[in-house]
Image: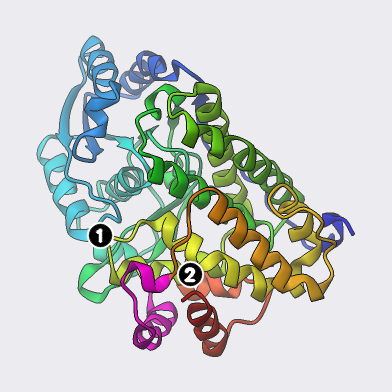
Amino acid sequence: MSWEQGININQVSTVICGTHVFLGVGAIKKMDFIAGQLKSRGVDSVIVLTGKSAYAKTGAWDYVTKALDQQGIRYTLYNKVQPNPETHQVDEAVKIARGAGAKAVICIGGGSPIDAGKSTAILLEYPDKTCEDLYEMKFPAEKAAPLVAINLTHGTGSEANRFAVVTIPEKKYKPAIAYDCIYPLYSIDDPALMTGLPANQTRYVSIDAVNHVVEAATTVLNNPFAVTLGKEVVDLVAKYLPLAIQDPKDLTARYFLAYAAMIAGASFDNGSLHITHALEHPLSGMKPQLTHGLGLAILLPAVIKAIYPASGAILADLLSAVVPGLTGDAGEAEKAAEGVRSWLKSVGVTEKLGDVGFAKSDVSKLVQLTFETPGLSGLLDCAPIHCTKETVEKIYTESF
């Protein structure tokens, strides 16, 4: 059985490739070109969003400031973006950006700074709106300031797509937005900036990329582009993640993991996401210290088991590098789930929900958040199976 049998040829798909990405060792040097492009657009001041230290430790900051200085572009640094960024941080960055007269946004970091930067870019164009307004979908975002993303991890794919996620901490909501206006104008994927990623972070971001394509390839919106990208992602991660864990300085491994994450971002830009992300967002909404990729890894086997009967043809092909021998038969759901669990264990990820601070008594709240958080019901609607509260409860429960 081949994955082609899982495609509805009567569904008219939109194939999207929205960002100019510079990929390769030394790509950070393209900042000279990017700064010139910003200047040609009349940008004379930018806000730079990043986390606490990686922007400096990787050397990215030196390239950025030199390029901006050469073009006479002023820059203001906001380096308070935390993992799983929150609305109040974005509002603070927007206030600082407006005070500095920023006309563009540069993000340096992984998915969190990039997502916060995307949100800032929108809000610079909507002075009467807050980040909470944006993530409660109180207005449609149709414009944003120019955005540049310098990616320091190989996982989220945010540098190559139109998605962003920010948490509303007071409500424990972690919604996702998707707007065409937040495709980065330019992005940089330079493997040399990623060699300092700790081993666990290397694991988690790469597993994030795998989750992106497992979902994108099996949504009701999938298309051949999303599926074929997905197969390549799983193959590359299966091959190069162990090498990057063994030798963090292996630039070849980092290159192909960065490429895999980038095309995974394009895959779910085209196919969307579904259950795993819809259920992970409540996890890190309740416990912001939980790394997104780890939350996804914990849920993935139970999600595979749930969707395999509906998507076996695609999953058998997609997962062949990590679970060889699948045929796509609906009766293989448990085998597929166990195979994915074994692969996760082989790359050093063994945690379950109880290991990261959840109790079974939390399940009802998690189910409630899954259906209440703005935007997550839209992800569930994209799943290849009908997702009831019972479906969601079973996946959470099986993840303990």
Q: Residue furthest right?
A: 1
Q: Secondary structure at mark 1?
A: helix
Residue that protrudes farthest toward the left in the picture:
99
In percent of width and height, residue 97 lies at 16, 40
Which dot, 2 or 1, sits closer to the camera? Answer: 2
Return the residue at label 2. 278
Height in image: 128 above or below 283? Answer: above
Q: Nearer the viewer, residue 380 or 15?
A: 380
- Does label 2 or label 1 sit earlier along the sequence? 1
Residue 104 on the magenta segment: no
Residue at the image point whose x is 15% and y is 31% from the top: 76
Residue at horizontal 74 percent and vertical 60 percent from the top? 315
Instruction: Point out residue 11 in the picture as x, y percentages from the top left corner.
Output: 78, 62
Q: Is residue 129 visible?
A: no
- Please state which of residues 383 and 326 is positioned toward the viewer in this rendering: 326
In the image, 228 versus 364, the foreground residue is 364
* Residue at the (39%, 80%) spot, across then down: 366
Reading the image, the residue beneath label 1 is 131
**In this view, which residue lies farthest toward the top?**
70
Amino acid of disc 2: Ala
Q: Which residues are magenta?
A: 353-375
In space, the residues marked 2 and 1 are separated at their CA atoms by: 20 Å
The secondary structure that dominates the magenta segment is helix
Q: Quadrant of residue 18?
A: top right
**Residue 367 on the magenta segment:** yes
Q: Which of 288/80 is in front?
A: 288
Q: Give the residue type at disc 1.
A: Cys
Residue 205, x across and y down, in percent = 45, 46
Note whether 189 is above or below 135 in the view shown: above
What residue is at 40 percent from the left and 28 percent from the top?
A: 195
